[in-house]
Image: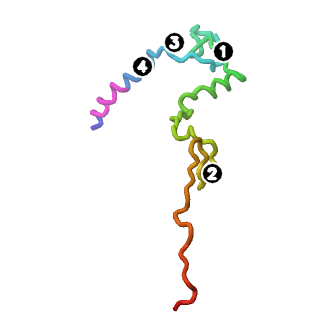
Amino acid sequence: MKTSLIIWASPFVVGLVVSLALANPDMLPKHPGYPMGKSLDPVKGQPLANDPGQTNASGGNALVGSAAFDDAHSSQHLSINQNDQRLLEKPGAGILPKVQGPNIKIEPPVKEASKTNASPQ
């Protein structure tokens, strides 16, 4: 059981190692946020940041960019209800709204209760 697990897991581990070794920093998104700038490693001369040359995100630019980043995903896009276009006023729960067009008044189903004599005969 242990040998078969090693045989099945080894291609996945090799694939992970190869993908990390061949990662291309040019495919990373271009955005401000890494404060390294064009810093180089003194020993090998390689850039120290994943996207060298990018400026640090600071101040109002960072706040505006972070606030607007996910607007398309998180904003509500409700469909237009054709019935709501006639509304003039919504007074609240239990009260009919005022609308454009004919003034429809709904009468109560019973106008007067039935009357009985107090003294039975």
- Please, what is the three-letter code of the amino acid marked with disc 2? Gly
Q: Position of residue 115 (x, y in %)?
A: 55, 78
Q: Which residue is mark 1?
A: 55
Q: How many marks?
A: 4
Colour setup of the view: rainbow
Q: Given the image, on which type of amino acid does mark 1 rest?
A: Thr
> Front-most of 7 and 38?
38
Disc 3 to disc 4, C-alpha distance: 15 Å
Q: Which residue is mark 2?
A: 92
Dominant secondary structure (helix, strand or loop) of the stretch shown in magenta: helix
Which mark, residue 26? Answer: 3
Sequence-wise, which precedes: disc 2 or disc 3?
A: 3
Q: Quadrant of residue 65?
A: top right
Counting residues from the start of the chain, the first of labels 3 and 4 encountered is 4
How would you rate the neighbour count of disc 2 (Cα within 10 Å): few for under 14, some for 14-19, many for 20 or more?
few
Q: Amino acid at mark 4?
A: Ser
Q: Residue furthest bottom?
A: 121
- Mark 3 is on which residue type? Asp
Label ID, residue 19 = 4
Is residue 82 visible to us here?
Answer: yes
Measured in 3D between alpha carbons, the distance from the residue under mark 1 to the one under mark 4, in whole angstroms, is 28 Å
Q: CA distance from mark 2 to mark 3?
A: 57 Å
Q: Which residues are magenta?
A: 3-12
Q: First in sequence: mark 2 or mark 1? A: 1
Mark 4 or 2: the one toward you: 2
> Dots 1 and 4: beta carbons under 8 Å?
no
Element carrying mark 1: loop
Q: Position of residue 26 (x, y in %)?
A: 51, 12
